Amino acid sequence: DAMVIQNPRYQVTQFGKPVTLSCSQTLNHNVMYWYQQKSSQAPKLLFHYYDKDFNNEADTPDNFQSRRPNTSFCFLDIRSPGLGDAAMYLCATSRPGKEREGREQFFGPGTRLTVL
Amino acid sequence: GDSVTQMEGPVTLSEEAFLTINCTYTATGYPSLFWYVQYPGEGLQLLLKATKADDKGSNKGFEATYRKETTSFHLEKGSVQVSDSAVYFCALRETGGFKTIFGAGTRLFVKA
């Protein structure tokens, strides 16, 4: 089945120790997103890629970086995690499509990050 | 900017009760509208969608109708089950863009 895969599902890191979360997709979608979600709040968009074009949200901290080496993979790097960065991180994809098609997002299962 | 407002939870219902979760939106143009569901410890899943005014999205007994005149997209189900317990997010896809705007989410508890 075509899907969005996130690894690992659970990640524990220490305060200030860099961590990388990964996302892969078999849907061949052009657009990939990273969201941060805390305590079943609405997901907060960090950035998205349309192919190789990177789009950063204005309020995404500099501590968060992303890489997309190819269509299938996207990485979220947190350079110096703080306690406030503990959250669920969700990867999603969509294809541009036509307006009438809706262009919904397809989400991975998420990576829960704990910062000690 | 575009925004989505949905009723606060939690909503607690008994099994087989009728469910309504209200959702209203503010947007320019003609956005597509969605309901996503999130089960504990999982990512979001698309529940249903509607892409133009008066469209009705439906899936697994859930329904929502795109009402442009009232800028609403209320979620309904005639008879809820314990397995419907989850968080429900109303969302819109901005016209001509790639971003999805989510409501705050409504947690639903269904008791046996």
Image: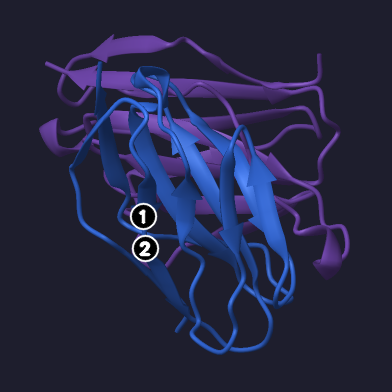
In this view, the residue in front, B44 or B9, is: B9
* Residue drawn at x 27%, y 45% as measured from the top left: A41
Name the quarter where the N terminus of chain A is drawn.
Answer: top right
Tell me the distance, in whole angstroms, between the alpha carbons under discs 2 and 1. Answer: 4 Å
Q: Colour of chain B?
A: blue
Q: Chain of mark 2?
A: B
Quarter of the rendering containing residue A38: top left
Quarter of the rendering containing residue A12: top left
Which residue corresponds to mark 2? B22
| Colour pattern of the rendering | by chain
Question: In the image, is A93 to the left or to the right of A17?
Answer: right
- Which chain can be seen in purple? A
In this view, the residue in front, B23 or B58, is: B58
Q: Position of residue A49 (x, y in %)?
A: 67, 51
Q: Chain of mark 1?
A: B
Which residue corresponds to mark 1? B21
Q: Amino acid at mark 1?
A: Ile
* Residue drawn at x 56%, y 89% as measured from the top left: B69
Image height of A79 relative to A33, above or below: above
Name the quarter where the C terminus of chain A is drawn.
Answer: top left
- How many neighbours does mark 2 have within 10 angstroms: few (below 14), some (14-19), or many (20 or more)? some
Question: In the image, is A96 to the left or to the right of A16?
Answer: right
